Each structure stands twice: as C-alpha cells, then as structure tokens.
Amino acid sequence: MPTVPSCAIVIFGASGDLAKRKLIPALFELAREGQLHDSSYLVGYSRSQMTDEEYRKECHEAIKKFARGGFDEALWKKLEPRISYVAGDYGSDEAHSKLADALKALDGKLGASGNRLFYLSTPPNTFEPIITCLGERKAKAGTGDGKAWQRIIIEKPFGRDLESAKKLNVLLHKYFAEEQIFRIDHYLGKETVQNLMVMRFANAIFEPIWNYKYIDHVQITVSETLGVGTRGGYYNTSGALRDMVQNHMFQLMALAAMEPPTALDATSIRDEKVKVFKSIRKIEPSRVDDFVVRGQYSVGEAAGQKTPGYLKEKDVPADSPTETFAAMKLFIDNWRWSGTPFYLRTGKFLTGKISEIVVRFRSPPLTLFQKQCETAVYPNDLIIRVQPDEGISWRLNGKVPGGQGALNIKPVALDFLYKTTFNVEPPEAYERLISDSMVGDQTLFIRGDEAEAAWAVVDPIEQGWAQSKNAPAQYAPGSWGPKKAQDLIEKDGRGWLHSGAEVEPIIACSL
C-alpha cells in the first residue's frame, strides 16, 4: 500500500447532505484504519455562516450517526483540533483569499506539507466559479519548495450533455493537468465492482467464455425503492438517464465488457473503458422508441412512502417529460460482443433496492435431456451484486435428490458474500476513493475523454425523446416499471432477471 501523504482536505459544500452522510464519516474511518496522515486536516467551506466550533459539532453528530465502525471518543479527540471552517460564496475571490490564508496558517500550525485536495461536493452550477477561483489563485499559499501537489475531486453529474462536458473539461484543463483531476463515481469504489476485474481476469474458468459465443446477453439493474422526495426541482433537470445511466450504469457495463488491460494502472484500465463507450452502437433519434423506454411513477405507495405521482411532486412541472425510469437495449460493436445485447434498467419507486449485473450464458446442447424432458434446462446465470449484500452468485443446474421415475433438475446458487467470506464489512466506497485521491491513484476515477464518450451515447437518446410525441409511460410505485420495459426484452424471447427473482420451476423428466 502506498504511504498516504499529509494534505489539507477542503470540502466545498461542507454543510450538505453528502458531506455529512458520506465524506466526513469516510475521513473518520480512514483515520481509524491509519490511512489519514497525522498532520492532515479538514477545512469545510460553504455559504452557511458557522464558527469552527459549530462546524466541529456538525462533524461530531455526522460521525456518531453515520460512521461505519461506530463512534470512537479517543479518535474524535485526536481529530477535532484538525477541523476548521470557512464561510463564503463559491465564486467570491475574497472568500477564496480567506481560505488560502487559513490553509497557510494551518499548514504551519499542524506541520502539514502544503498538499491540497479540493472536493467539490456542490451542485453542478457552482463548479465553474469554484474551479475558476481555485485556478486563478493557483492555491499556492504554503507550497514551500514547490513539490506540494493540488488535486480536485468533482462529483457527478459531470455536465448534462456532450457539449457541457466538453466545456467543463476545457475549463478544468485551463488550470489543472488531467492527472490532478479526479471525476468521482462512487460505484467504482464498491468492493464488488473492483472485484469484477479480478473475477474476470484472475480466473481461467471465465475469461475463455466471456464473449458472444457463450454469453447470451447481459443485464444491468440499478433500482431504488423511494421517489424523488424533496429533490423534485433538481431531479427534473436530470432524470434517470442522466442521473444513473450515463455514469453509474455505463461504468458497470464498461468493466463487464472491456478487454483485458495491458496493466493494472489507471491509464491502461481507462483506455479499455473508453474503447467500450466508443464501440456502443449509436441509437438514431428517430428510432429511440425501438430501443429505449422511459417512464414516470404514478400515484401510490411503496416502501412506506406515499406519492401523488411524479407530476405532482414538489417543484415538478405538471407537464414534465422527465423520466423516473429508463430501460434500454444496447449493442457493443466489437469482436468480443458481436450481436450480444446489453439490457439496462433503472428507476425510482421500484420493487427493491438492487444494483447488480446479470450475465446469462447460452444454454448447453440439450440433446441428452430433450430425450426425456419437455422443458429446456435452465440457463446458467452469473450475478454480480453491488448492493445490497455485496457478492457474487453463480447459478448452476443440479439434480434434486430422489425422484422415483423422474429426473428433477433445479437451479442452485453458489454464493460468495464479502461479509461471510472475509468476516468483515466492505469499506464504504468513499473511503477507498478519498484514500486513492490522496495517493494520486486515478484507476477508479473517470477520465475526461471517458466522460465525453459516455455522453456521446446518451445525447442521441435525449434528442430522440425531445422529438418523440410519446409521453413517458406511467408505472405503479412498487412495481418493476412500465409494461413497455417488459416488452422491450420479452420481444427478444428473454426476461428481466435479478437476484431476488424466483428461479423457474423444477424440470420434471421421465426416466
């Protein structure tokens, strides 16, 4: 493991929900694990007026409520003096000057190195003023001999289309080199996602059959059980396609589909992901309804939450075309995946909270069983579960004991769960990603051309929806989305799969 250097961690949006729920608890866990340098410190920055003591109290409450390993009073006493706060507008030169002075003073007081890690945990409309202020000032205060580094972490969404993503990249590259920019997607910090490469490339059983010859199709599901809640205003400018598909789901797809990298370094891995995005067959706007389904949840109740329907949620226009559900069929036009469909679906207010990849293999030759069975043997599925209960499940066919004149075959699951196998809770994604950013490892972050290549796939779909006369299909809260989503896959003779789904009935074969 590389040594984690000393640095100042500046969280813009320090009083926001993400900072309280994820970032501050993640820093506490890193300190618990010895992955936070003793002279590193945290500076919160937001518009809210607070003293250092008031901000420390907020951090204290956030850690007590959300820290994965629970609260440790002795550790808190050690960290508390290393937490400070600066209030100001995100584009204020005066406030940024105040921040620079505070960082210089804290470097001297705590014996820090002058390294800077800026985390933009703010709405997208604040990215430009923050980046500009940081870039113009160069944040040079306290850099000493010039060896100190400065890095910037940017939360999603990275743009809202290809044009805005390109503009944001131009702005970033005006002030920061690509190796200083960390575009974060927290899904890439999850253990199962990282394990996907190990499973594929470190096990001889999978790599020879990981192609169109043996795999019938791949499904990726990211479902949520709750609606937009109080975030209707923000969500209405985004929608499921921009909010989940362009980033989280495309990253899962790229890791499942990419070619073996030449090395396990950031450049090699991200090169292969870019190739996947550039190989995705573009959907013509005029044919978007043939390959993509969009939906909106209607009035109802699920997971203990009632809703008047998306169109009646707070801050959502009554005629909004924004989708709360999206499903699509994509093809990756390269040698490995020739003709193999990738089905993606995501939505709010669905039956269960699931994030997983299902790889369905082609059925084996069934001549042996067709002599005695009227029904086909159930195909093999490999389920890579990101959440909940991170792990991998391998569905095989086995004989049911007994039978007396009938050969009964039933799918059985070989399960690997992180909790039970390693007897530890997987670390939170943000713990790994913040640690990697401090040591400068960009492997689990998104490169600029990678973000643009993903948007190039999404843009024609958005254009097609803008031109389409079809409104989003309605679906009931607590369902798996609109019927059109079922039709999308069932017309190909397939069905949606997930780890919570019941397997097909026992196959009775006469002997």
Image (tube, rainbow, N blue to C red):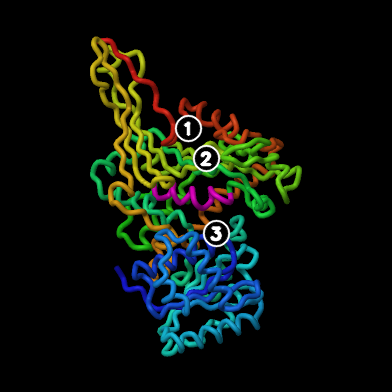
**Residue at image x 62%, y 75%?**
50
Work out whether residue 47 or residue 221 is closer to the camera in this orientation and state it: 47
Residue 401 placement: quadrant: top left
* Residue 287 visible in rendering: no
Residue span colored magenta: 242-256
Residue 190 is situated, as x and y percent measured from the top left of the image, at: 41, 54
State if disc 3 and disc 1 touch (CB < 8 Å): no
Find disc 1 in the rendering and name its residue. Answer: 496
Magenta portion: prevailing SS class: helix
Query: SS class of the residue under badge 1?
Result: loop
* Residue 486 visible in rendering: yes
Question: Which amino acid, mark 2?
Answer: Arg
**Residue at image x 47%, y 79%?**
81
> Separation of disc 1 and disc 3 at Cα?
28 Å
Find disc 3 in the rendering and name its residue. Answer: 156
Question: Which amino acid, mark 1?
Answer: Trp
State if disc 1 and disc 2 touch (CB < 8 Å): yes
Give the mark nearer the N terminus: 2 vs 1. Answer: 2
Task: Relative to 284, say whether 148 is above or below.
Answer: below
Looking at the rendered structure, the number of numbered marks drawn on it comes to: 3
> Separation of disc 3 and disc 2 at Cα?
19 Å
Task: Relative to 95, say whether 276 is above or below.
Answer: above
Instruction: Return the mark for residue 249.
Output: none
Query: SS class of the residue under badge 2?
Result: strand
Instruction: Return the mark for residue 345.
Output: 2
**Residue at image x 75%, y 47%?**
317
Task: Relative to 187, say whether 38 is above or below.
Answer: below
Give the mark nearer the N terminus: 1 vs 3. Answer: 3
Image quarter in which the C terminus is found: top left
In reply to whether residue 196 is colored magenta, the answer given is no
Question: Which amino acid, mark 3?
Answer: Lys
